[in-house]
Amino acid sequence: MVLDTAVTPSTPVWLQNHDLNSVDAVKAWVQHSGWGALVVNPGASARLESALAGADHYDASAAMTLIESTGRQVVAEMLYVSSALTTTAQTVARQYAQIQVANFQATDDPAQQQPNYAALINPVGFVAVDVAPAGFTMSPIMSTFGYLAILLPIIGVLIMWKMTSFPFFARVRFCDLALMWPVLLLGLALILSLYQALAFLAFRGPNFNSQALTYTTATFFKFWFTGTAVAFSLGLWLFNWFLHLTPHTIALPSICTVIPNVLSTISTFELAPKFYRVLYAMPFYNGSSLILYILTGAHPTIGRNVGVLVAEIVAMTALLTLSIWIRQICVLRGISDAHGWFHGSRYYHSHIPYYKDVRADAEHHAESLPPRRAGVEIVDYDDDGVSLTTGNLGV
């Protein structure tokens, strides 16, 4: 019996899978795509019959194997999948024991009156195996806390850039600005995600779990660059908003960005109705999925996760280019000031005059000038005897 989704993404249900003909095959399937499985080990019935016939040794735990993968989605596995596997196995064991005791009480065969009583009372046990262990203490909030530790400093830096970048937009060319801001954001993301990777290495050590994948040099760089992609995409997204928002509304995109991203990593939206599948687009979720795969090898969705992050980076970079162009126009025309207040607000203050006021002043100045004559008037200087009107050039 396996825990899987029947047709479309939904709550996992118990299904029979006859294509998996060995325990190793079931382990590989669970690690790759399944939620969990309950396997009746080969020879379980024969061992139980031998024990009921009087054999001395019987290991009830060899009857079933519970296979789970906490590295797929830590919270869902810990709250629902693991408990579902354990509850099912315990229910099977209890019901089978009741049947065995009832059969023993009803038999009159003297040959079956001296069974192995341990096998009679506890005929079925189980062993739990985690094929992609990620059940250490901080695993449910590891990626969430790490990405928050990156995102919050980025928000502070972006707000500072927004408040102090007025001279850049007033004096620097647009092509230079369009190149400068993404490069600065990428450098900031690289530095902060490097600290995250080093912090994880320092906290857990190279071998944070004896059953997990080894934390190699390649793992460190994968961890680092995944955090960079998440931080870079979110930084681009937020800076697009910050460039155009006024100070009293600048917190709104931060709140609307942080909350859905945090929910995508600590909730079990994969088991929720389809409406919540929008959280698949959150950078936190895609980065967390990549981190869990890097550390445990569970549920590889690399193509989808990397594709979403790259698409968001490309789209946000293009949108940031447009935002920089709009911001520079607003600055050069006096539409908005250094802090983002727009012309007409009582808080607006800019040394660059508003472009409509400049146009109105120019028109008023032109109207105040005396009218110009249509012809050209030639006036002679009387003291030198030279006349342009008569042609006397004094020669």
Image (spheres, rainbow, N blue to C red):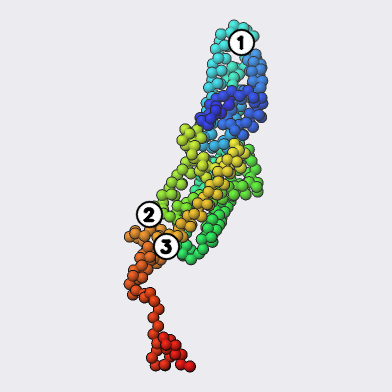
* Residue 318 x/y as whole percent: 52, 52
Q: Secondary structure at mark 1?
A: loop
Q: Which x, y percent locates residue 158? A: 47, 56
Q: Give the SS element for disc 2.
A: helix
Residue shown at 46% from the left, 35% from the top: 275
Image coords of residue 243 (percent x, y): 45, 56
Q: Residue at x 37, y 62 (%)?
A: 356
Which residue in the structure is indicated by mark 1? Answer: 113
For this orientation, the residue located farthest to the front is: 390
Q: Is residue 373 left or right of residue 12?
A: left
Q: Which residue is mark 3?
A: 333
Q: Is residue 345 left or right of residue 150?
A: left
First in sequence, mark 2 or 3: give its number: 2
Instruction: Kindly report which numbered mark, 1 or 3, lies closer to the viewer in this rendering.
Output: 3
Residue type at tag 2: His
Amino acid at dot 3: Arg
Residue appearing at x 62%, y 31% in the figure: 29
Quickly name the residue at label 2.
Answer: 248
Please, what secondary structure does the residue beneath circle 3 have? Answer: loop
Mark 2 and mark 3 residues within 8 Å of each other at the beta carbon: no
